[in-house]
Amino acid sequence: MMTKAYGAQAGDLPLGPLDITRRAPGADDVQIDIAYCGICHSDLHQVRSEWAGTRYPCVPGHEIVGRVSATGRAVTGFAIGDLVGVGCLVDSCQQCEECDAGLENYCDQAVGTYNAPTPDAPGHTLGGYAERIVVHQRFVLRIRHPEAQLAAVAPLLCAGITTWSPLRHWRVGPGHTVGVVGIGGLGHMAIKLAHALGAHVVAFTTSEMKRAAATALGADAVVVSTNSSEMEAQARRFDFILDTVAAAHDLNPFFVLLKRDGTMALVGAPPTPHTAPSAFGFIMKRRSLAGSLIGGIPETQEMLDFCAERGIVADIELIRADQINAAYERMLKGDVKYRFVIDNASLRDQRTEDG
Ligand code: NAP
Ligand code: ZN
């Protein structure tokens, strides 16, 4: 089916309108008319080929929400009209140890929502900057928030689950002191979720102007990380630190803030390496450095339901598709509170270059 989309033909070109095709729904497929799609910093890394291996045309977008518009004959859990979401995954092998554990994100054959090999044209997956998408039912999430919140739910599908999964894995809760480094799309969700899980939350930012806003998100304290005396005052206070920063930086000043047996988990994925903590940083307090990749489908549903029960959504700025390139530039400057979300209805007004 012809579908209007927005994407790039090469890493050094801006995004623009594209016509793409979506497969007709197979037996296990759910077709979704996309209402909104969030803009993740991973979209920018990939579309500009900052990570190796971007395939073009590249249509990014993995924070997808909308309504079911068709279902295959074997689809049981979804009906036309349901409010649903799709995150960073659209398929996996569905039979390995990781898939059996509900951690499809770690399946060796996991299929990303965009830029992953697929039998469908053009040979790689195309994401949510599009009017519609067709996804295997296992990878479709149910949205229980009120429809009025739908645009602000979109970022939960990546920023939400990418921060929820490590917070849960490292059992963050009451009595824990948690640091969140970087207050962007991921970081602002980490603050909200860690606060809702009952932890004492300290936000670390390079932006003095985000200080007040971080408190409003649920941070109990805010530290401007370029201020060394503010940093030193936090020494050995943290059980867990989540680093969401999109650029390479020195991990040492944060790592030494962990208590004995504390863990720092990286979710930010800059294209170049960080400066690693010194051996003594690990040895002296038996600290750990770890990483985490998005999350599995069951835990994504758990996070969505947790957020729906508590009225948690992202703080967003809604834009039209023709504002995506400008939004990327603002995201690079940290000038967004805290997630851009595309109103996909605006794609219908777009014209491709040939008509
Ligand atoms: P974002 O909205 O751009 O936020 C990143 C934040 O990092 C900024 O708001 C800024 O916070 C901080 N920062 C400090 N120095 C920076 C610099 N030189 N350049 C850019 N940011 C800087 O990005 P996001 O969407 O939250 O994504 C963050 C990172 O996570 C990206 O690398 C993305 O690819 C990655 N990611 C990983 C996963 C995973 O599964 N592990 C999933 C999604 C995204 P302050 O102004 O507060 O300092
Ligand atoms: Zn993402």
Image (cartoon, rainbow, N blue to C red):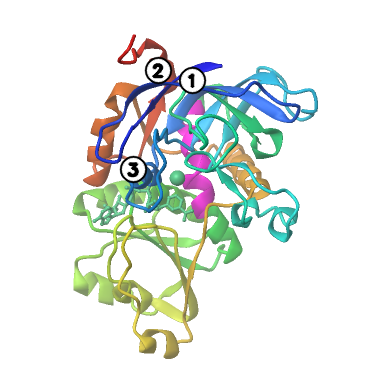
Q: Are marks 2 and 3 in contact (CB under 8 Å)?
A: no
Q: Is residue 196 in view from this perspective?
A: no
Question: Residue 20 location, x and y as percent?
Answer: 47, 22
How far is the residue under mark 2 from the one under mark 3? 19 Å
Q: Which residues are magenta?
A: 150-163
Label 1 element class: loop
Quadrant assignment for ligand 2: top left
Q: Quadrant of the C terminus?
A: top left
The residue labelled by disc 3 is 44
Asked which secondary structure carries label 3, the reply is helix
> Residue at coordinates 58% horizontally, 45% vertically from top-left?
111
Query: Which three-letter amino acid code belongs to the residue tagged 3?
Result: Leu
- Majority secondary structure of the magenta segment? helix
Describe residue 42's horizontal placement relative to residue 91 as left or right: left
Rate crowding at label 1 as few (under 14), some (14 to 19) or many (20 or more) other CA atoms within 10 Å: many
Some atom of ligand 1 lies within 8 Å of the CB belonging to the residue at label 3: yes
Q: Is residue 155 magenta?
A: yes
Q: Is residue 154 magenta?
A: yes
Depth check: 58 or 247 in front?
58
Relative to residue 233, is residue 163 depicted above or below?
above
- Residue at the disc numbered 1: 131
Q: Quadrant of the N terminus?
A: top right
Quadrant in the rendering for residue 180? bottom left
Q: Which residue is mark 2?
A: 347
> How busy is the neighbourhood of tag 3: few (under 14 within 10 Å), some, or many (20 plus)?
many
